Amino acid sequence: MKMSVHSIKTTTIKNSETIEPSYYFVIFDDYLQPKKQQNFNKHEKELLRFNGKHTKEMTLNRSIGEKWRLMFKKFTQQRAVKVKPLNNLNETNVPKPKCSFQIYCEIASLHGFIYLVSTSRWQRLFWYFILCLMLYLSITTLWNSLSLNADNPTILYVGSKTGIMWGRSFPTITLCNMNRISKKKLNDLLIKDFSAESANRIRPFIPYLLYGSLPVNATSASYRYLHTILSSKNYTHKEFLQTISPDCESQLLRCKIHGQIQPCNALFRRVETQNGFCCAFNFDDVINGNQTAEELNIHNNRFGYKWGLTVLLDPQVEDYYASRNKFAGYQIYSRSASDFISINQPNEIVFPRREIYVHITPLITEVATAVKWHDLHLRRCYLPKERKLLAFDDYSQQNCFAECRSRRMVKICGCVPPLWPRAHNWTVCTLMQASCVMSQIDSVMRTIHPSGKDYKLNQKAERYICKCYPKCESLIYKTDYGNTILDRNYSISDLEFYRDIELKNHLVVHAFYAEMCNDYMRLDVRYHLLNYFGLVGGITSLYMGFSFISGFEIVFFLIILPLGNLLTRISKRRLARKRQTELKKSQLLMRK
């Protein structure tokens, strides 16, 4: 590129040794033209002659006026800009034209590029190293940030801690007696259906019925013998166990809800769990097509133990026959109505002569619309109705884990233990398959959390845990427990509730909302469009001072300017060919 330089030569004042500084005006459009040898045309020579010599000092006003005179001449509409004085510049000593990269370095808004053209060789090498290092650091930091978002695109944060719980369904409170078999009910059944000699023979084998929930040590012959005895009386494993398990009517002595005493049989029902048969309040789950009445779904609009659920329990210590532990008491589960109670689900143990307070705080998780566009293995949660279960109508992570264990047991032993959840086409295990179940139960439990692998740190591990992701939108109940000694000697409160009951080994459970407000969690994507702008702009500007203007400059010098130069060359070639054609035609006409 040969830039067109229109100069005002150095002025020498006669009879004086003082040399006035020269001022040069450069045609800016020609300054950006492609590098090629150009000859001064007629208009440029006229412009040189027009500029002439300035014997007077060039002030700001004169400089502006000279620029405007150059721009408003009829022979040019190009822009003239003033540049610094150059020494010994004449028509034969024109400065070497600058390439596009040099021009870009001079006007670039990115930090450090100006030093690549205006310094010595060793300084340029130093700044080349610095700029390459900054470019590498910015790309590495940006790549790590984007990779983190690609692996974990969602984030869970507290949306509000002052949400109102009004109208929220009260959680399901399940009370499981540590005693799995009632001594009184077992004796009554043996007396009714068996002779005294047969009852004495089968009595030691009764705890083997709880092989799925208690650590029993029995042989295959013992299971076969017990199966033969039950079959002779037309009992199935589940029916026999249900008959001899403690009932809710004798354990629940008095109940109170919303400050009003209510019949316990209207608030509680007997349910199946992997721990045996328990008593559940506000149980509204759907298992194998059986659904409870709608009126049992209790809503609570008040907080404090006075307005929650209060239950007076009799653990029936004298009736204990088969217990996992060497003490009496209850296991208390506070959960959502759709969660199935498994063996290893968190619970609280309460002992006789104690009064326990269950502080409940709802935790509501809402999901943003942007989360739905991510794949399942990235967001790691299920949208409503996205995952269906065979044994449950409502999906929850606990139900998925329980069904996963049952499905694993079906593949190994061909059946499901009696108190485990199952699909309609899955066979219920009899005592003949008890040995298989007992030999595989530990490995089945480990399928949820494989030994030797931390599924929380391994991003791909969650894919083989039966794909039991939590729900994106959920209602979870956080529970805190506190207990004290049950002593009514000096109390005058709740006289009606404790009327005609002599407290011995009894215990009282208070379940209630701890406070009026609850937490609202929000599941959202980590980066929205504006976050990406901030991330990219913040990192690149920190290292190199990058901005939108810098991006437009790069686009201009890489795309627009070369394209414009290409179009200009094409236009000039066409114009030259056209002139050549017209010249040939004129010559032919002159010859004729």
Image: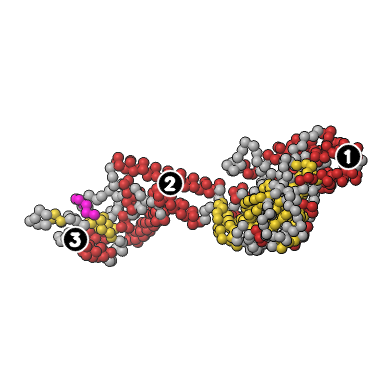
Type of amino acid under label 3: Met
User: Cα distance, mark 3 to mark 2?
Assistant: 47 Å
Q: For the image shown, how many numbered marks are present on the structure?
A: 3
Q: Position of residue 80 (x, y in %)?
A: 28, 60
Q: Secondary structure at mark 2?
A: helix
Q: Is residue 223 above or below residue 81?
A: above
Q: Is residue 100 above or below residue 303?
A: above
Residue nearest the viewer, comparing 580 with 482: 482
User: Cα distance, mark 3 to mark 1?
Assistant: 126 Å
Visible residue check, residue 467:
yes
Q: Secondary structure at mark 3?
A: loop
Residue nearest the viewer, comparing 187 with 60: 187
Could you tell me if the residues under marks 3 and 2 are in contact, i.e. CB atoms within 8 Å? no
**Pointer 2 or 1: first along the chain:** 2
**Pointer 3 or 2: first along the chain:** 3
Which residue has dot 2 on it? 138
Q: Nearer the viewer, mark 3 or mark 1?
A: 1
Q: Main secondary structure of the magenta part?
A: loop
Which image quadrant is residue 225 in?
top right
